């Protein structure tokens, strides 16, 4: 275990952000180890050995050779770009480059002999290799060791970094939405109390909900509530915002998820077939249907479905009923129609680019069947842009489900935000938008993980980074 912590610290402490995090999370440990480092630093022979190596390099006239080489390079560069550079500037630039190379060469030679600079970073990393040190510091440095464990694996480090980025994205989204609502011309007090409300009533309303406070104070209260899961009380109805969202958000998420699954199940096979048989009758038919699916407004499609399948044929309920799963079918189809068309068109386009690549031609020349070529080579390499589009469309579904929810009388998060935005009910809108932002951030993280699953080159870059 100590070797794992040592490698993780060595690998990640080179980044200033991680080094700062290691120091802050293990502050109780560093309070004791830093004085020990100061006491042992005077015993280090690194500076003396570095001076000996530097003297040896200078005696071998390596620095002089590098200086001349860099002078030639600087003159060539100036001539190529037609720049007039005086000789003194070229000499100074070459001297600086030669000095940098000298420092790199000193570090390289010392490292080859097992001699490292006695910095606090190196001193602490060596301490992590000692089992006794780990045993003594595991409790006071538990947070630091947890971070070292997370960052020891490239995939867990990637997920951790994405989650951290998502936190900043959510804060940014919440700040932007709050600012827009704050500067909007709508007055919540007047809209809720009515035009006949007296100035005293309006003032009392603003004081009750903190709307009389400065912008920064209101923003701080809103953002701090996000991290304590206390989104406050809505202006209209005085309902708890967190509980309202928890009741409404699952419905929207359920419909969006099933719509996405339906779209993937239909669109990807359709796109593959169209790409394998381009410019054929079946290709024209599929792409025409996809174009129609993109062009149909969801509210019109929803009304037509209600008139046809609910009122005329009586196959499905016209409005949503939580106790009847059949009432979900029409909203799922309506919400998934446009994204099915988009995914199908992207699949066809991506597949057409892949099937003309050299490795596909080579696979055909080897005698592989068309089915194996498509399933084992083409689809896997065509999935990256398709996955990207799926992620973007899913985010659009969560934000744009309000129209479908209104048509089918679904009390979801989309219609909830629409109902509250004209007041504007700041806590309710902010809470709804943040929940959607959290879901989209998680979906985008999963999509990035899927990138690594489908493309080994991305996995390799993650490991090297």
Image (cartoon, rainbow, N blue to C red):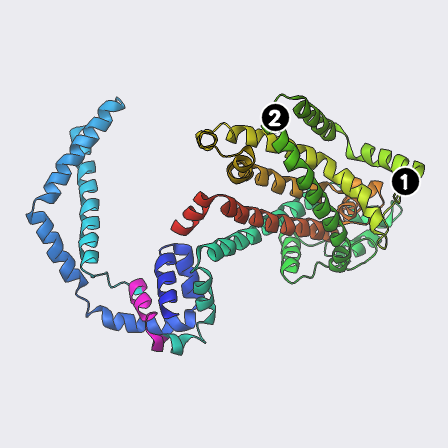
Give the residue displayed 54% in from the left and 54% down from the top.
Answer: 163
Mark 2 or 1, nearer chain start: 2
Left or right of 304: which side holds 95?
Answer: left
Mark 1, residue position? 310
Q: Nearer the viewer, residue 284 or 393?
A: 284
Closer to us: 385 or 21: 385
Q: Which residues are magenta?
A: 121-133
Q: Residues within 10 Å of mark 2 (few under 14, many from 20)?
A: some
Of residues 223 and 332, the one drawn nearer to the viewer in this rendering: 332
The span from disc 2 to disc 1 (Cα, nearest Å) is 37 Å
Task: Residue 232: tell me if it is visible.
Answer: yes
Q: Which residue is mark 2?
A: 277
Residue 60 lies in the magenta stretch: no
Query: Quadrant of the rendered structure where residue 19 is?
Result: bottom left
The answer to if 129 sits in the magenta stretch is yes
Residue 112: x %, y % from top left: 19, 56
Q: Is residue 350 left or right of residue 74?
A: right
Q: Label 1 neighbourhood size at 10 Å, few (<14), some (14-19), many (20+)?
A: some
Q: Residue at x 39, y 57 (%)?
A: 12
- Using the image, determine if residue 282 lies above or below residue 314: above
Q: Secondary structure at mark 2?
A: loop
């Amino acid at each position: 275990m100590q070797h794992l912590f040592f490698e993780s610290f060595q690998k990640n402490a080179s980044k200033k952000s991680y080094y700062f995090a290691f120091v802050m999370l293990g502050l109780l440990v560093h309070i004791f180890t830093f004085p020990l480092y100061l006491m042992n630093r005077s015993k280090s022979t690194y500076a003396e050995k570095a001076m000996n190596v530097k003297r040896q390099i200078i005696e071998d006239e390596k620095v002089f050779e590098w200086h001349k080489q860099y002078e030639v390079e600087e003159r060539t560069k100036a001539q190529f770009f037609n720049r007039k550079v005086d000789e003194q500037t070229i000499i100074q630039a070459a001297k600086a480059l030669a000095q940098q190379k000298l420092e790199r060469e000193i570090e390289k030679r010392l490292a080859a002999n097992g001699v490292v600079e006695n910095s606090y970073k190196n001193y602490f990393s060596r301490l992590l290799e000692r089992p006794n040190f780990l045993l003594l510091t595991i409790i006071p440095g538990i947070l630091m060791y947890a971070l070292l464990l997370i960052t020891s694996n490239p995939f867990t480090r990637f997920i951790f970094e994405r989650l951290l980025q998502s936190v900043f994205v959510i804060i940014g989204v919440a700040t932007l939405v709050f600012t827009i609502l704050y500067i909007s011309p709508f007055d919540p007090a007047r809209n809720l109390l009515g035009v006949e409300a007296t100035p005293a009533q309006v003032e009392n309303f603003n004081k009750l909900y903190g709307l009389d406070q400065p912008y920064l104070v209101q923003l701080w209260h809103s953002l701090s509530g996000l991290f304590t899961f206390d989104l406050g009380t809505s202006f209209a109805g005085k309902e708890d915002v967190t509980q309202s969202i928890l009741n409404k958000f699952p419905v929207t998420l359920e419909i969006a998820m099933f719509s996405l699954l339906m779209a993937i199940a239909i669109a990807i096979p359709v796109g593959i077939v169209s790409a394998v048989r381009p410019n054929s009758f079946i290709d024209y038919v599929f792409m025409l249907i996809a174009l129609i699916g993109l062009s149909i407004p969801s509210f019109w499609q929803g009304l037509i479905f209600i008139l046809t399948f609910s009122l005329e044929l009586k196959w499905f309920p016209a409005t949503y009923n939580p106790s009847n799963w059949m009432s979900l079918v029409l909203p799922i189809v309506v919400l998934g129609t446009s994204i099915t068309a988009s995914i199908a068109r992207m699949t066809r386009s991506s597949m057409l680019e892949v099937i003309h690549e050299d490795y596909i031609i080579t696979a055909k020349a080897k005698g592989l069947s068309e089915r194996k070529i498509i399933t084992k080579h083409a689809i896997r390499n065509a999935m990256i842009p398709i996955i990207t589009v799926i992620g973007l469309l899913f985010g659009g579904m969560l934000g744009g489900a309000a129209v479908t929810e209104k048509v089918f009388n679904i009390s979801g998060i989309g219609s909830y935000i629409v109902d509250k935005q004209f007041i504007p009910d700041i806590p309710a809108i902010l809470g709804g938008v943040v929940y959607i932002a959290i879901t989209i951030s998680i979906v985008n993280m999963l999509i990035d993980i899927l990138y690594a699953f489908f493309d080994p080159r991305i996995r390799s870059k993650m490991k090297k980074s």
